[in-house]
Amino acid sequence: MRNTLTAECERLGVALTPEQIDKFCAFGDALIEKNKMMNLTAITEPEAVAKLHFADSLALLNVVDCKGKSIIDVGCGAGFPGVPMKLGEPSIRLTLLDSLQKRVNWLHETLDTLGVEAACVAARAEEYAAREQFDIAVSRAVARLNILAELCLPFVKVGGYFLAMKGAAAEEELEEARHALYVLGGKAERIAEYEIDGVTHRVVVVRKERPTYAAYPRRFAKIKQQPL
């Protein structure tokens, strides 16, 4: 894990100290160990964790300036991309948001043990009252962009960013979501690309241009049934 992470960071141009790499390895070890008892990730090989969880998340530090920014990771699961972003750029003020209390409890305990400061919140995104309080919202959730945008953009301050981690269908999802982004006060700036393990990964970069109307987000059942 250590060697793979070091090599990936050099390739991405992300500088980590030995102490930061130690924390990554400790977090990775805790993830793999806990996964034996609780379903946190399908990726359990140390080298794969370093590439597909850690390097994939760290790449976001090159997409927009994250130094000193308040960031919310929406639907964080086992802490990705938020935890690696915080480990890579400690000045980030991080909030991890997930609907499953057990995952949030594990994140809180693990990060506390590592001495990593983060707010760990168990709540559904559409119900968490933190409107327009964050500089950046990030998500690696599997929902399509027009649905994900309604869950994430309301958290972002005007002038801030929503970063949606996507795969090969990023351009198609962006076209589908353009109306939703406009209604929610956002505008797509670009699709950033980077390579992990020979595969091109994409991030849809959305800038928040106007406040989101109070009617959004709607209840999740409504968002799913009638996407913007």
Image: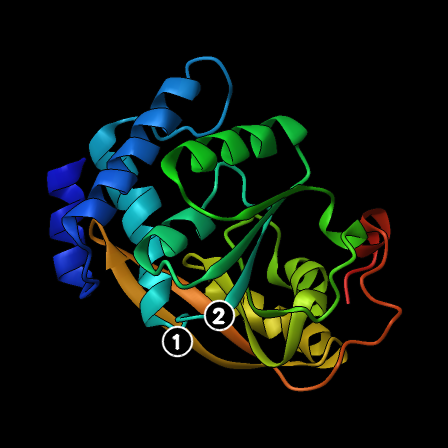
Q: According to the image, label 2 marks what residue?
A: 69
In the image, taking residue 186 as reference, residue 195 lies left or right, namely: left
**Which of label 1 and label 2 is nearer to you?**
2
In contact (CB < 8 Å): disc 1 and disc 2:
yes
Q: Residues within 10 Å of mark 2 (few under 14, many from 20)?
A: some
| Disc marking residue 224 | none
Q: Residue at x 41, y 14 (%)?
A: 36
Amino acid type, callout 1: Asp
Residue 27 placement (x, y as % from top left)? 34, 34
Q: According to the image, label 1 marks what residue?
A: 65
Does residue 89 show up?
Answer: yes
Q: Residue at x 70, y 58 (%)?
A: 151
Residue that protrudes farthest toward the top in the picture: 37
Residue situated in front as seen by the camera: 159 or 181: 159
Q: Residue at x 20, y 56 (%)?
A: 16
In the image, taking residue 81 as reference, residue 8 lies left or right, namely: left
Report helix, strand or loop for mark 1.
loop
Q: Quadrant of residue 5?
A: top left
Q: Residue at x 48, y 28 (%)?
A: 40
Residue 227 placement (x, y as % from top left)? 77, 61
Residue situated in front as seen by the camera: 213 or 147: 213
Instruction: Look at the image and tell me in which quarter the N terminus lies.
Output: top left
In the image, taking residue 192 as reference, residue 158 lies left or right, namely: right
Q: Is residue 121 above or below residue 107?
A: below
Residue 55 placement (x, y as % from top left)? 28, 51
Residue 108 placement (x, y as % from top left)? 53, 35
Amino acid type, callout 2: Lys
Does residue 224 show up?
Answer: no
